[in-house]
Amino acid sequence: MSLKLFVSFFLWSISSFVFSMPTIGFYDRHQLETYEDLSDIPSDFDFFANLTFTFSCEGKSVGLYADQEYACRIFHVCDENGDDIPIICDNGTFFDQQQRICDWRQEIKCDRAHDWYYLNELPYRREISDEFGVQAIEDLPLTVATILQNEEVHSVLPLLTP
């Protein structure tokens, strides 16, 4: 009986200690703080708060296009209907039109991005391979879904559009 009493007291004292500890950070059921809320470093959301685009997908093939007006920090996904979805590369990266990935600034030449737009007009192909190497090359239909399923575009944040 005394062992049971001791265990109960021990568990009670541990739980009261844990629950009385001050919390690190701030928690509100309706709003959680993020790193950006706690940091003095401006985020991409601050930098691109009110965007307007002159870029248009009209007359362009389905594909990914760097927006040179925003120094390749943003690229546009043009779909089959001529609509575009603007996407921002994550903090510190820029869209490399030639490789069609977000990459570090020193690796890309944004002023030459338009020279690589033609890559979106080429047939989209996927290599089918096994442990012995490439077996075949398959032509895929050119749609946004095909591109996004087969193209690795790392570190991007979709922009909200009205």
Image (spheres, helix red, strand yellow):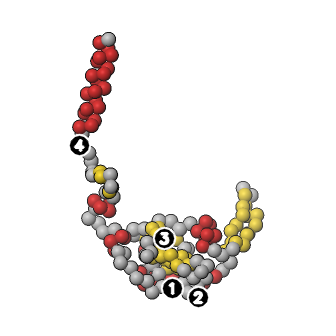
Residue 103 in view of the camera: no
Q: Earlier in the sequence, mark 1 or mark 3?
A: 1
Alpha carbon distance from label 1 to label 2: 8 Å
Q: Mark 4 points at which residue?
A: 22
Task: Tell me whether circle 1 and circle 2 mark residues in contact (CB < 8 Å).
Answer: yes
Determine whether the residue tagged by mark 4 lies in a helix, strand or loop: loop
Q: Which amino acid does label 1 sit on?
A: Ser
Mark nearer the viewer, 3 or 2: 2
Q: Do the residues labelled 1 and 3 touch (CB within 8 Å)?
A: no
Q: What residue type is labelled 3?
A: Cys
| Mark nearer the viewer, 1 or 3 | 1
- Residue 56, numbered circle: 1
**Quarter of the image where one finds residue 63:** bottom right
Residue situated in front as seen by the camera: 37 or 92: 37
- Alpha carbons under labels 1 and 3: distance apart: 20 Å
Q: Picture quarter containing residue 35? A: bottom left
Q: Are marks 4 and 3 in contact (CB under 8 Å)?
A: no
Q: Name the spot of residue 128 as percent of width and height, x first.
A: 72, 64
User: Is 119 on the left-hand or right-hand side of 87?
Assistant: right
Question: Residue at horizontal 54%, vertical 74%?
Answer: 100
Which residue is denoted by mark 2 in the rendering?
Answer: 59
Q: Distance between the residues labelled 4 and 1?
A: 52 Å
**Is residue 33 something that shows in the picture?**
yes
Q: Position of residue 96 (x, y in %)?
A: 50, 75
Number of residues whose C-alpha sits closer than 10 Å to that of mark 1, classed few (under 14), some (14–19) or many (20 or more): some
State the mark number for residue 146.
Answer: none
- Residue 20: give x, y in percent of width and height: 23, 37
